Image (cartoon, rainbow, N blue to C red):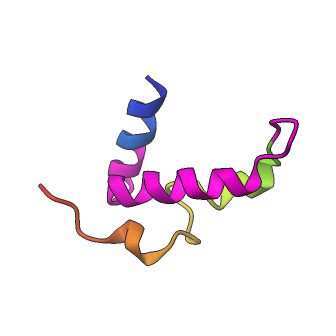
Amino acid sequence: AMIYSITETARANGLNVYYYVKHLLTELLEIIRIDGSVDKKELESLMPWSKDLPAECYSKRRK
């Protein structure tokens, strides 16, 4: 259910789901602390509505 929610929210925000999830997984590895916690402020830049996402996340998606 979580994966479905993430992909549908990305789709609703006009993102290419493949590139968004790829970016999300790559960046999450960088911000997760050793104890498994994450600073919520760092997560904001990964949200599907964030203006800080790379251009490839906005590439055309197949219909």
* x and y percentages locating residue 47 in the rendered image: 57, 53
Instruction: Give the residue displayed 62% in from the left and 58% down from the top.
Output: 27
Q: Nearer the viewer, residue 31 or 11?
A: 31
Q: Residue 58 sits in which quadrant?
A: bottom left
Q: Residue furthest bottom?
A: 55
Prevailing SS of the magenta stretch:
helix
The answer to which image quadrant residue 59 occupies is bottom left
Q: Inspect the magenta stretch and tell me whether residue 39 lies in it.
A: no
On the picture, is 33 further left or further right than 11? right
Residue at 57%, 57% in the rendered image: 26
Question: Between residues 50 and 18, which one lies in front from this camera angle?
Answer: 18
- The residue closer to the viewer here, 14 or 29, is 29
The N terminus, quarter of image: top left
Against 2, residue 7 (above or below) is below
Magenta segment includes 32: yes
x and y percentages locating residue 10 in the rendered image: 40, 50
Q: Residue at x 38, y 42 (%)?
A: 7
* The magenta segment: 9-37
